């Protein structure tokens, strides 16, 4: 089972964003996680399609775009044109979630659904076959640098069981508070795509840090119930 390392640039120095992205690619990141916030669905405000389009000119890293916004449907085409390879929406922001997922897939890109900590897994139970990514938020979304919510490990474990039972190949992604102390527990529970933000960007040597995260994750996966069974 491949473990993906997806650095988030939410806490990066935006005055040096191009350099940050180039360095993360050089250091071995698998994809780039782009947190899009609208100041409504979450209190924070980040950036939009023009920034993503600019970054797509300087890197070959796939862009994993996480839409923490109200009415995400209106942004799909713009982000797809800007270079997004996947779009993840929040179940809490979508009245007709199945239709929303199909709109993403109709653009020829990967579709994901994110669940906030208090949102039950039942929100995605009947659309798992349509999903490429299921993202479990392990903090309440809005800011980087928050502490990991430990009860999310059981939620991750239950989702992995649902994916196995349904035969779904969807990535089980986690986002929030992932660091070298929490990475083992989320992978052991079932995660195979790790969004790592401030804990990675605060390191002096990003290449070494990514290598360490990958090593810890691969070791945890090798000994896990979901990979060995």
Image (cartoon, helix red, strand yellow):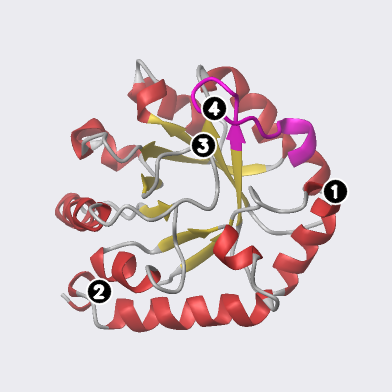
Q: Quadrant of residue 193?
A: bottom left
- How many residues crowd mark 1 within 10 Å: few (<14), some (14–19), many (20+)? few
Count neighbours of disc 4 (C-alpha within 10 A) and say few if under 14, some if 14 to 19, many if 20 or more.
Answer: few
**Separation of disc 3 and disc 2 at Cα?**
32 Å
Residue at mark 2: 227
Q: Earlier in the sequence, mark 4 or mark 3?
A: 4
Which residue carries the number 1 mark? 15
Q: Is residue 223 above or below residue 17?
A: below
Residue 224, quarter of the rendered image: bottom left
CB atoms of marks 4 and 3 within 8 Å: yes
Query: Is residue 56 toward the left or the right of residue 87 in the image?
Result: right
Image coordinates for residue 89, horizontal then vertical, percent: 46, 32
The kind of secondary structure element at disc 3 is loop
Q: Is residue 58 left or right of residue 155?
A: right
Give residue 139's position: percent from left, percent from top: 39, 46
- What's drawn in magenta, residue-wise? 36-52
Tell me the crowding category of disc 3: few under 14, some 14 to 19, or many 20 or more residues within 10 angstroms, Cα based.
some
- Residue 43, disc: 4
How much space separates mark 3 and mark 1, taking CA atoms?
A: 20 Å
Q: Residue at x 69, y 79 (%)?
A: 205
- Tell me the SS state at disc 4: loop
For the residue labelled by badge 1, is the local secondary structure a helix, a strand or a loop? helix
Q: Residue at x 40, y 54 (%)?
A: 173
Which badge, 2 or 1, comes first in the chain's sequence? 1
- In primary-sequence order, the first of circles 3 and 2 is 3
**Residue closest to the eye, 75 or 183:** 183
Residue 7: x %, y % from top left: 59, 60
Q: Nearer the viewer, mark 3 or mark 2?
A: 3
For the residues labelled 2 and 4, the Cα–Cα distance comes to: 37 Å
Is residue 127 covered in magenta?
no
Q: CA distance from mark 4 to mark 3?
A: 6 Å
Using the image, tell me which numbered label, if any, was put on residue 142: 3
């Amino acid at each position: 089972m491949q473990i993906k390392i997806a650095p988030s640039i939410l806490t990066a120095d935006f005055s040096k964003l191009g350099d940050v992205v180039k360095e993360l690619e050089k250091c071995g990141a698998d994809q780039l996680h782009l947190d899009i916030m609208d100041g409504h669905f979450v209190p924070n405000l980040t950036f939009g399609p023009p920034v993503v389009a600019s970054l797509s000119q300087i890197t070959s890293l796939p862009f994993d775009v996480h839409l923490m916004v109200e009415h995400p449907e209106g942004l799909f085409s713009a982000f797809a044109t800007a270079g997004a390879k996947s779009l993840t929406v929040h179940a809490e922001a979508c009245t007709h979630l199945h239709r929303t997922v199909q709109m993403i897939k109709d653009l020829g890109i990967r579709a994901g659904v994110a669940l906030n900590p208090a949102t039950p897994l039942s929100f995605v139970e009947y659309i798992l076959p349509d999903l490429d990514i299921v993202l479990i938020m392990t903090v309440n979304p809005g800011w980087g640098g928050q502490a990991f919510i430990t009860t999310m490990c059981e939620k991750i474990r239950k989702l992995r069981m649902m994916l196995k039972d349904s035969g779904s190949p969807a990535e089980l992604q986690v986002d929030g508070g992932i660091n070298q102390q929490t990475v083992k527990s989320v992978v052991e529970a079932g995660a195979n795509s790790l969004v790592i933000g401030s804990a990675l960007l605060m390191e002096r040597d990003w290449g070494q840090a990514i290598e360490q995260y990958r090593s810890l994750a691969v070791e945890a996966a090798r000994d896990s119930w979901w990979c060995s069974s």
